[in-house]
Image (cartoon, helix red, strand yellow):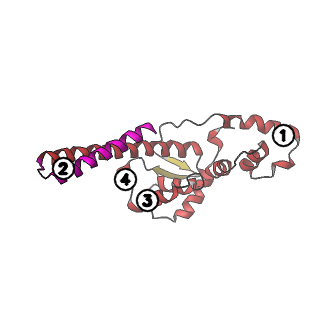
Amino acid sequence: MNWNDLNLNMFTRLALIKDGTMLDLITAITGEDAGNLPLNELEGWTNKLAFLDKPYKPSNPKKEYILNGITYIPVLNTKDILVNQFIDFQEFIKEPDAHIANLAAIFFIRKGCKYGDRDPIEEAKFLGEHLSITDYKDVFNFFLKAWRQYINNTQASLISNLRKTLKKTKDKTTRIKILRTMINLKQIHLLESLI
């Protein structure tokens, strides 16, 4: 067993375990009560789940994913996200482990459809059962990097425009407000680079 074998539902059950035992992990993966396992099977599961000790390192996402015969296109460009997708993203990202399938439904869109064409709850259920955690993490990580770059570009553009406005402005009060805004933006950028 490895990270590719975990679908989103299994991963969610694992992520919600706090200080769990091996029995808790097996129960989360199988959905069965692991307390009834013979000891030799418990040892087998212990070996199978050794991959959980090493975190998954996301790789580049694919252009499309075929899940149970259905083709999904990942949202990889921040400019392609719709307002309602962004609103849903803001809501579900507050508790990402609990809403991983809902987040997947935001970033994996059936080919030929757009976000909102299909019931997002049904899509989340389907993706929870059929999408691997590795495919999800590849797309999600790629999107977050692109989003961070988009924010950085927006901040740089805003600072550039503020500099131009500062050069043209004679009013002392306005100049102070512009300088304060520029300082705040640079502080935010500095804090983000430390994270």
Badge 2 amino acid:
Arg
Which disc is residue 156 wearing? none
CA separation, marks 2 and 3? 38 Å
**Which badge, 2 or 1, comes first in the chain's sequence?**
1
Magenta includes 45? no
Q: For mark 1, give the secondary structure.
A: helix
Which disc is residue 80 wearing? 4
How many other residues sit within 10 Å of disc 4, few (<14), some (14-19) or many (≥20)? few
Which disc is residue 175 wearing? 2
* Screen quadrant of the N terminus: top right
Q: For mark 2, give the secondary structure.
A: helix
Residue at image location 53% in from the left, 48% down from the top = 66
* Residue on which disc 3 sits: 85
Q: Judge depth for marks 3 and 1 and give the one in front.
A: 3
User: In this picture, which residue range is highlighted in magenta?
Assistant: 168-195
Magenta stretch, main secondary structure class: helix
CA separation, marks 3 and 4? 10 Å
Badge 3 amino acid:
Gln
Q: For mark 4, give the secondary structure.
A: helix
**Which badge, 2 or 3, comes first in the chain's sequence?**
3
* Residue on which disc 1 sits: 41
**Which badge, 4 or 2, comes first in the chain's sequence?**
4
**For residue 150, which quarter of the picture?**
top left
CA separation, marks 3 and 1? 44 Å
Residue toward you, 10 or 96: 96
CA separation, marks 2 and 1? 72 Å
